[in-house]
Image (cartoon, helix red, strand yellow):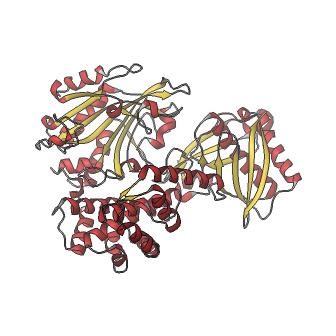
Amino acid sequence: MTTDEIRERYLKFFEGKGHVRIEPAPLVLENDPTTLFTSAGMQPLIPYLKGEPHPKGKRLVDSQLSLRLQDIEEVGDNRHTTYFEMLGNWSLGDYFKKEQLEWCLEFFTKELGLPKEKLWVSVFEGTKEVSKDEESASRWKELGIPEDRIFFYGVDKNWWSRSGEPDKMPAGEIGGPDSETFFDFGTPHNPKYGKECHPNCQCGRFLEIGNSVFIQYQKNKDGTLSELPQKNVDFGGGLERISAVVDGLSDVFLIDVYTPVIKVLEKETGIKYGSSDGNTTSFRIIADHLRAAVAIASEGVEPSNRGQGYILRRLLRKAIVRYSRLTDKEIKDFLKSNSLDTIVEALGGAKVKELFQAEWDKFERTFCTAYPAIMKLATRENNIVSGEEAFELFESHGLLPDVQKEVLETRFGKRIDWDKFKELFEKHQEQSRTASAGMFKGGLADTSEEVTKLHTATHLLHAALRKVLGEHVSQKGSNITAERLRFDFSHPQKLTEEEIKKVEDLVNEQIKEDLPVSFETMSLDEAIKKGALHFFGEKYGKEVKVYTIDPSTRPARSGLAPFSREVCGGPHVSHIGELGRVRIIKQEKVGAGIVRIYATTGK
């Protein structure tokens, strides 16, 4: 059964259970401050999991492309990937544990034909705040999973939120206990992973293929958990892992989405996949990282030293140095004689191969410039490379940590003080954020009440600026903290004092009316036809949210056109009276035809 066939079977199975198929979100989201990429299928659905009605109902299903950076160091074994496709079904305050666990088992055993005796499950053992999940354990027993194949784990294994365990969740984050499903390949246990084997053992015997998360809690500002107004189900099943299990493969890199790139690598290098542990690890890293890089670049991201562009650069360069290891050449010689064209084409990335070749060429120049400094460290007697020396290679020569690991640690047996490097790197990042005059797209610091108010205020300011200055004004970026908003827009010169006053008065007139903020979900084409402003269209999915602030909702102002109508995915207040008053506190010219204003809200 192909990966495509499994995906379609899953979607149709849950459509048969009353679910509506929804469009997946883009990999690169606008106005989501929590992550650089869509890292889970539930991420675009957070407002609805918190209680906001979804226009397509309470039962939803889709397949979501995801990128999870916390797994980047795990890539190289038989199951971890950074980039993957997540099958997902949700109940938004509708069914709960009883139905979910039954349907989960039915899909795996009846739809895909997996033997029930090969399935093991785990459930939440509980904490002081959250009870032990006896309900899920009892339900699994009713469904025919014997007690000796049901394991209880703590928050490190059977609690799910995007931030991890409850104590790591920021205020406002949602999560809950989960019940995972594992497939047992029956391979002998490797004692180096512990005395006893169990579903969460890392020896390779078990492979997690699905996780039913019961999202029913939200983190409070005081650190406690409170129950959400509705109990939700969020199932996530890694399509690549499920495909491997259906085909009887314990190695996900042997399924159909990876075999084209594996075959190209075998042809290019003359090495057979699986011929040795070291080579197999390199094959897997190259296949995963380039597949992820193609997906990121296909959404308009280019390699850079910041944000998504930095991740793209890191993935590409790590894949390149691993590729060089397979050829048994020094990196500097390898960089002069090879390219990624054939591999990228095998991954369906023909449109981005020129971009990747340009990054290859840039990496060659960077590495050759840094080569004398690298070799000085590599050939000296001292076996330790200090954090300061490693950071110097990064800051002065642009040599990413992954490249330093490959050359200095793997090839020359040096040991780098990564703790010190991390300390210096984080300080560097903070200084870069503070000093930067670059453009931001949806740069929200968090989703707190203060940030939400200021984000809503950017809609009002955007509309007012266009009314006062002209329709040539368009948003070029924003950065919002709890203290102030920063908004970049197109305009040839700074505003006059009179223009600033007109903008403020226009905005505050709407706030005084306490106009409601409403939204609709529609296609981008529909949004455009309705006159919604949209300036980051390449990052939107097929369906978008359109937020409207409309004075005609007030009897005295009936018949007026909407004050603001804009495509947006960020958080908003329900009524703009909550903002108090908007005041522009500063402005500056930040580039040719770009003006930046700073503003606050309050009394």
From the image, which quarter does the C terminus lie in?
A: top right
Look at 60% across and 45% down and name the residue there: 444
Q: Position of residue 331 (x, y in %)?
A: 34, 73
In this view, the residue farthest toward the right is: 498
Q: Nearer the viewer, residue 220 or 551?
A: 220
* Residue 263 in the figure: left or right of residue 400: left
* Residue 250 in the figure: left or right of residue 312: left
Q: Vertically, is 94 above or below 593?
A: above
Look at 31% across and 22% down and name the residue there: 133
In this view, the residue farthest toward the front is: 381
Q: Vertically, is 522 above or below 476?
A: above
Q: Position of residue 123 (x, y in %)?
A: 28, 28
Q: Which image quadrant for residue 88?
A: top left
The answer to whether residue 248 is visible is: yes
Q: Which image quadrant for residue 496?
A: bottom right
Q: Nearer the viewer, residue 86 or 324?
A: 324
Look at 66% across and 39% down and name the residue there: 482
Q: Position of residue 82 (x, y in %)?
A: 36, 52
The answer to whether residue 472 is visible is: no
Q: Nearer the viewer, residue 170 or 593?
A: 170
Q: How many marks?
A: 0
Q: Position of residue 330 (x, y in %)?
A: 32, 74
Q: Vertically, is 475 above or below 161?
A: below
* Residue 442 in the figure: left or right of residue 391: right
In this view, the residue farthest toward the bottom is: 337
Q: Nearer the viewer, residue 384 or 407?
A: 384
